[in-house]
Structure formats: structure tokens, C-alpha cells
């Protein structure tokens, strides 16, 4: 059986320019796409919140 990629949903959000520039730089340093990096940090944030509850 092949590994299945998680289902993805396209969303459109508006972010501050300085935040986008910072995130793009961090994603590049981590050798990830902008989208992958945002997914990673959101997942990490949610996991941390769930641990506190």
C-alpha cells in the first residue's frame, strides 16, 4: 500500500507584508515552501495548545 498524502484544502488569507517576508525567509532557511512552513508552524501551535488543555 502506498503512503497517502494528507488531504489539502486551498484557503485564501490576508497577512501583513512584514509577516509574509519573515515567514518566507524562515521557510527558505528551513528548506521548505512557504505553504509547508505555515502548515508546520500552525500544527506546532495547535499541538502546544492541546497539550496545555
Image (cartoon, grey):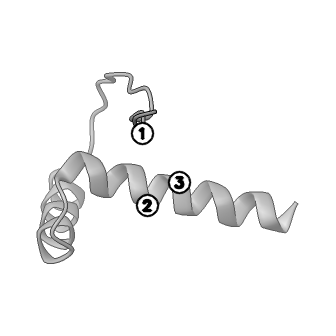
| Marks 1 and 3, how far apart at CA | 20 Å
Name the quarter where the C terminus is drawn.
bottom right
| Marks 3 and 2, how far apart at CA | 5 Å
Q: Residue furthest bottom?
A: 29
Q: Residues within 10 Å of mark 3 (few under 14, many from 20)?
A: few
Let me know if residue 16 appears in the view.
no
Q: In the rendered image, which residue does mark 2 sit on?
A: 41
Name the mark on residue 52.
none
Mark 1 or mark 2, earlier in chain: 1
Residue ID at (12%, 70%): 25
In this view, the residue in front, 21 or 9, is 9
Say which of marks 1 and 2 sits in front: 1
Q: In the rendered image, which residue does mark 3 sit on?
A: 43
Mark 1 or mark 3, earlier in chain: 1
Q: Residues within 10 Å of mark 1 (few under 14, many from 20)?
A: few
Contact between marks 3 and 2 (CB within 8 A): the answer is yes
Let me know if residue 19 appears in the view.
yes
Residue ID at (46%, 33%): 1
Question: Compared to 31, does 40 lie above or below?
Answer: above
* Percent coordinates x, y for residue 6 in the rendering: 44, 34
Drawn side of residue 16 relative to residue 25, left or right: right
Amino acid at each position: 500500500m502506498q503512503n497517502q498524502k494528507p488531504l489539502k484544502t486551498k484557503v485564501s488569507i490576508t497577512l501583513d507584508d512584514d509577516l509574509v517576508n519573515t515567514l518566507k525567509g524562515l521557510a527558505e532557511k528551513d528548506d521548505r515552501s512557504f505553504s509547508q512552513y505555515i502548515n508546520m508552524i500552525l500544527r506546532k501551535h495547535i499541538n502546544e495548545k492541546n497539550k496545555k488543555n
